[in-house]
Image: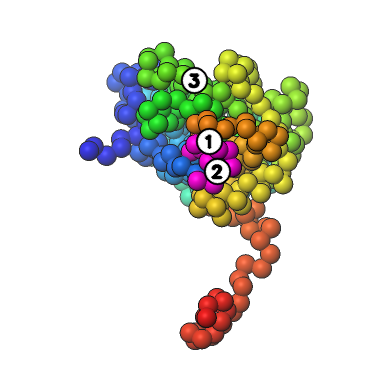
Amino acid sequence: TVPWRGVIAEYRDLLDLIPDDLEPVTLREGGTPLVPSAWLSGVTSGQVHLKVEGDNPTGSFKDRGMTAAISVARHEGAQAVVCASTGNTSASMAAYAARAGLTPIVLIPEGKIAAGKMAQAVVHGARIIMVRGNFDHCLQLARQLAWDYPVSLVNSVNPVRLQGQKTASFEVVDALGDAPDVHLLPVGNAGNISAYWMGYQQYFDLGRATKRPRMRGFQAEGAAPLVTREPFPDPETVATAIRVGNPASWKLAEAAADESGGGFAALSDAQILDAQSQLARRDGVFVEPASAAGVAGLLADVAADPAAYAGATVVITVTGHGLKDTATALSGAGELVDQVVDPDVDQAAAAAGLR
Ligand code: F0G
C-alpha cells in the first residue's frame, strides 16, 4: 500500500478553493487513528471511537487546515502569514510556514499559552507577539494586520482552513464504512465543528455515507457563548485552547448543530480535567484539557440520561496531544515520585509493592 500522503493529496478532488496547480506544503498530516474506547462503549452501551488528532505532526487537528492555508498562501505569493491563537494554531502555522519559507507571525493572549505550544512557535522561528487581552482581541488584531499590511491571515476565518479540516470527517466515514450516529467535540472558535459538518454533508451528498451524525459541541462554562447565545467578554477556563468568548464561526457552528439535530452544552473545568485524567488512565490516551471536553460531554450526557447513546455509534474527536500542556496535567497530581531508592533490587521491589 502507498504511504499516507497528507490530506490535500489524499482528498484533493473533494476540496474546494485549492487551485489545480497547487504544490502542497505538507508534513503528511491526517490519517489519524480512530481508536475504539472499551471504557466509553461500556459507559454508553454503544460503540464509542476516539478520533485521536494529537497524532498529527504538530500534535493537534490544526495541521489539516494549515496544510491547505499555507499551501494556498505560498501559491498566491505571500511572504508572511499571521494568526491569532490560544496556542495550537500558532504551533501548526509556525511549522508549516517554516517548511514553506514564509515568515510566521503569531498573536497570543497574555499569559495563557501552554508551554509546549509556546515552545513549538519558538523552535519553528515564529515572531511571537503577546497581546494584553484575550484570544478575541488577538483575532481582531490579526484581521486588521492582514487588511492593512502584506501578510496573509490563516485563522479559520480563511475558508481554505475549513476545507482542510473537513477531511477528518472523510477519514471517520472511510474507517467506519458509514457516518456515526453522533459526533462529539470541543468547541472554541467554532471552526472545527463547522468543518466536520461540511465534510459529513459532502460525503452524504456523494452517497459515501447513508446518514449524517448529530453534532454535539462542548464548551467550558467560563467560555460558553454558543450555549448562552451571548459573547463572553472575559472568557476564563483551565482549558486554555478553548478560552474563546466570541467565536469567528459562530453562525456556521449554530447551523451545524441545528441542521444535524445536535446542540451545545457547557462543562465545568472540574468535569473537563476529570475526563482528561480518566481518558489517560482507562484508555491510554493522553490529551490536553480542552481536548477532553467531548469525553466530558459524553459523560455528562450519560449522567443526565443513561440511555442517551445506547446502541449508537459515537465518534469523539480528541483534538490535541497531552504533552502540549504538562503543567496542567501534573498540577493535581500531588507528589510525582512515589519513593526514592538506591540502585538495589530489594529496595525497588519494596517501593513498587512487589513481593
Ligand atoms: N481543541 C483544541 C486542542 C484547540 O486548540 C482548539 C482551538 C479547539 C479544540 C477548538 O476548535 O476553535 O475550531 O472550535 N484552538 C484555537 C487555537 C482557538 O488558536 O489553537 P475550534
Tags 1 and 3 touching, CB below 8 Å? no
Q: Secondary structure at mark 1?
A: loop
Disc 2 crowd rating (10 Å Cα; few below 14, some 14-19, many 20+) is few
Q: Position of residue 325 (x, y in %)?
A: 59, 51
Quadrant assignment, res 204: top left
Residue hosting label 1: 46
Judge left or right: residue 264 versus residue 2: right
Quadrant assignment, res 208: top left
- Which contiguous range is marked in magenta? 38-49
How far apart marks 3 and 2 lie (CA) works out to 24 Å
User: Can residue 299 be found in the magenta stretch?
Assistant: no
Say which residue appears at 44% left-offset and 42% top-offset.
35
Q: Identify whether 318 is placed above or below 347.
A: above
Residue hosting label 3: 212
Q: Position of residue 50 (x, y in %)?
A: 49, 40
| Along the line of sight, the residue nearer the viewer: 49 or 321 | 49
Give the mark nearest the N terminus, 3 or 2: 2
Q: Identify whether 349 is placed above or below 256.
A: below
- Asked if residue 304 shows in the view, the reply is yes
Give the mark nearest the N terminus, 1 or 3: 1
Task: Identify which amino acid the numbered label 3 is placed on.
Answer: Arg
Judge left or right: residue 239 versus residue 99: right
| Along the line of sight, the residue nearer the viewer: 327 or 285 | 285
How far apart marks 1 and 3 lie (CA) works out to 17 Å
User: Can residue 41 be found in the magenta stretch?
Assistant: yes
Residue hosting label 2: 42
